[in-house]
Image (cartoon, grey):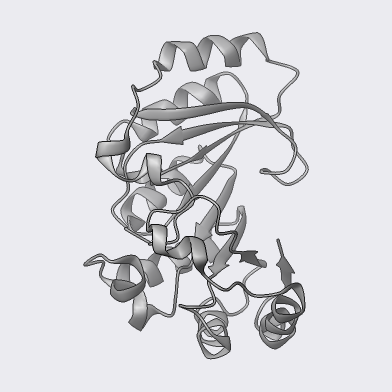
Amino acid sequence: MLIGGFQRFSLIDYPGKICAIVFTQGCNFRCPYCHNPELVDPKHFSHSIPEEDIFAFLESRRGKLDAVEITGGEPTLQPDLIEFIRKIKALNYLVKLDTNGSNPEIIRALIELKIVDYLAMDVKAPLARYPEITNSNIDPAKINQSIELIKHSGLDYEFRTTVVKSQLGKTDILEIGKQIRDSKRYVLQKFVPVKVLDQNYLDDVIYTETDLECLRNAVKSYVAECVVR
């Protein structure tokens, strides 16, 4: 595993649980507003944190931490992700996986192996706009496949969209709502232009809290729960 960061404690990233967070290096998307550029672009990678250090900490915190969140970057690009999660589960931790949904085969395997407890998938845009928004050659059908796998997984999950005003409008959010129709939870994430992959986005005009609440009200009928974060 290429691990670019490790957060030992969080009360907000896994709903209702105390978790540690593992940040993997590498991503197949190049979203210009990405807030973890040091985990996306190889030229910004720091030295990888040894797995042994992670597991030594997790062993020492058994009974105090509830869960481990694996995020990135894009964790499903890691060839040894499944084995890494197996080791975490062997310590009796819950596992939350954050993903961009580009590798439905890995998501399916994790669900079938029953080694993940919570799935959080970023839905970047309406399917037709994925190549444009992510600056990638992603097949939008793979994104849709991941959405359906997660919806029918029987696990806790959420879909979420970082709402960047220069890229996504009300029509886009409504289209995403249709894509994830009847989902448990949809999170509209406020874009904060502090640390980004494309420096031009530091000057982006952002949605106000009122704007975000209007978007939430517009899309909430498609899902069981819609929140602004």
Residue 158, horizontal then vertical, whole percent: 61, 60
- In the rendered structure, the answer to whether residue 31 lies left or right of residue 85 reads left
Who's the residue at 71% across and 24% down the image?
Answer: 65
Q: Is residue 225 visible?
A: yes
Residue 178, horizontal then vertical, whole percent: 54, 85
Q: Quadrant of residue 211?
A: bottom right
Q: Quadrant of residue 183?
A: bottom right
Residue 131, horizontal then vertical, whole percent: 28, 73
Who's the residue at 45% across and 68% down the image?
Answer: 124
- In the rendered structure, the answer to whether residue 204 lies left or right of residue 51 reads right
Who's the residue at 71% across and 79% down the image?
Answer: 216
Task: Find the residue positioned furthest to the left.
Answer: 137
Task: Find the residue positioned furthest to the front.
Answer: 203
Which quadrant would the C terminus be assigned to in this image? bottom right
> In the figure, 18 relative to 140: above or below?
above
Residue 190, horizontal then vertical, whole percent: 64, 64
Who's the residue at 53% across and 9% down the image?
Answer: 56
- In the rendered structure, the answer to whether residue 215 lies left or right of residue 98 reads right
Q: Is residue 140 visible?
A: no
Which quadrant would the N terminus be assigned to in this image? top left
